[in-house]
Image (cartoon, helix red, strand yellow):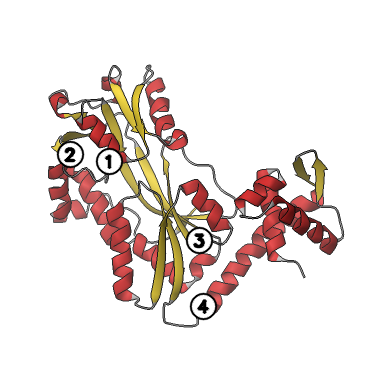
């Protein structure tokens, strides 16, 4: 009988290329990975790996077994979810990770709604970097990981992970108060400005640099932070202009919020799960709560609030708290936890 743990290790070795990389991804020691791989080779009776120095290459048999491993591991999750679906009571524990710059209102609203509807459901929430969260998810230490990608610099697809789209959040330009009369609409209008940007090299600064170079300039970055509110504070202090997600909490900051029309930039927020696990009543309930219509209405409301006019942070908060019926019907975001390819 094949061990699912060993199949999971083999799949990570195929992805990472080294036993050390697989060990790190699965929170194991390299000797433990080596031992389990040797045991797996004895179980199947054929060589699965070619070892060359520190790297490892899978044989043709090893690659074929990895293909089966994807199906087997997903079917195990499906079987577990199918059995748990026999009870009408949504209960148990779901381990959820959120990224630091996640829209807090959306997450908290979902947690509060779940607490009211499912008193026997416990949700353990932690703050984790998206890349680390995916590693923990694949290792079975998390059940759902919230993540995101910038539209212009998407994250590479991860083997063994399903994505469930939640919403798309527009990016807005932040200006110091003394520049509010300039009203830039294109990123090219800020070619000579200093920039305050997200410290996330792969999906923050990289996206801004990509767009700026397309428009013929190199952005002068003077401030970097992994906290979007800190970027707002830097803009308020006059260090430069900034680009942040629309739902960033900027309350109390004296900055101008300006929609960017050329190009339109956004980030896509999604929930990552192991394939097959979303059939679990508990996990399905959390995914549905995260993608609830109230959350999409909030996003659409804020998008509409800045579509035609420059606003300050307190005006933005007022628009959020007093949505009009017309706004609620505009440009709806996904309202169900359907997986995306």
Alpha carbons under labels 4 and 1: distance apart:
41 Å
* Element class at badge 1: helix
* Element class at badge 4: helix
Q: Mark 2 points at which residue?
A: 253
Relative to 248, 274 lies left or right: right
Alpha carbons under labels 2 and 3: distance apart:
35 Å
Q: Name the residue under label 1.
A: 229
Q: Do the residues labelled 2 and 1 touch (CB within 8 Å)?
A: yes
Residue positioned 27% across, 46% down in the render: 247
Residues packed near mark 3 inside 10 Å, few (<14), some (14 to 19) or many (20 plus): many
* Element class at badge 2: loop
Residue positioned 30% across, 33% down in the render: 243
Relative to 151, 4 lies left or right: right
- Closer to the camera: disc 3 or disc 4? 3
Rendered location of residue 139, percent (x, y): 59, 58
- Above or below 333: residue 116: below
Query: Which badge, 4 or 1, comes first in the chain's sequence?
Result: 4
Q: Quadrant of residue 172?
A: top left
Rendered location of residue 230, percent (x, y): 28, 38
Alpha carbons under labels 2 and 4: distance apart:
48 Å
Alpha carbons under labels 1 and 3: distance apart:
27 Å
Alpha carbons under labels 2 and 1: distance apart:
9 Å
Q: Nearer the viewer, residue 320 or 235?
A: 235
Query: Which badge, 3 or 4, comes first in the chain's sequence?
Result: 4
Q: Name the residue under label 4.
A: 84
Residue positioned 35% across, 64% down in the render: 289
Alpha carbons under labels 3 and 4: distance apart:
18 Å
């Amino acid at each position: 009988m094949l061990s699912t743990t060993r199949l999971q290790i083999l799949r990570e070795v195929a992805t990472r290329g080294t036993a050390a990389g697989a060990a790190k991804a699965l929170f194991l020691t390299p000797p433990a990975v080596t031992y389990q791989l040797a045991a797996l080779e004895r179980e199947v009776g054929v060589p699965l790996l070619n070892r060359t120095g520190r790297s490892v290459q899978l044989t043709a048999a090893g690659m074929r077994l990895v293909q089966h491993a994807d199906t087997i591991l997903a079917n195990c999750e499906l079987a577990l979810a199918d059995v748990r679906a026999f009870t009408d009571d949504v209960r148990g524990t779901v381990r959820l990770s959120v990224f630091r710059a996640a829209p807090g209102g959306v997450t908290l609203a979902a947690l509060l709604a779940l607490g009211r509807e499912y008193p026997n459901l416990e949700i353990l929430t932690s703050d984790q970097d998206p890349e680390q969260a995916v590693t923990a998810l694949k290792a079975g230490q998390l059940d759902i990981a919230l993540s995101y990608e910038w539209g212009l610099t998407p994250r590479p697809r991860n083997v063994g992970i399903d994505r469930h789209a939640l919403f798309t959040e527009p990016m807005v330009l932040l200006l110091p108060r003394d520049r509010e009369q300039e009203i830039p609409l294109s990123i090219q209008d800020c070619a000579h400005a200093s920039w305050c940007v997200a410290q996330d090299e792969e999906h923050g600064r990289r996206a801004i640099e990509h767009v700026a170079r397309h428009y013929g300039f190199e952005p002068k970055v003077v401030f970097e932070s992994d906290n979007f509110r800190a970027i707002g504070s830097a803009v308020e202090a006059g260090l430069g202009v900034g680009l942040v997600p629309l739902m960033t909490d900027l309350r109390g900051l004296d900055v101008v919020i300006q929609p960017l029309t050329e190009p339109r930039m956004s980030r896509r927020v999604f929930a990552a799960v192991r394939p097959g696990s979303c059939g679990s009543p508990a996990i399905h309930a959390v995914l549905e709560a995260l993608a609830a219509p109230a959350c999409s209405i909030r996003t659409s409301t804020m998008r509409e609030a800045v579509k035609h006019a420059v606003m300050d942070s307190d005006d933005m908060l007022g628009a959020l708290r007093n949505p009009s019926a017309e706004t609620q019907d505009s440009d709806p975001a996904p309202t169900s936890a359907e997986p995306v390819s």
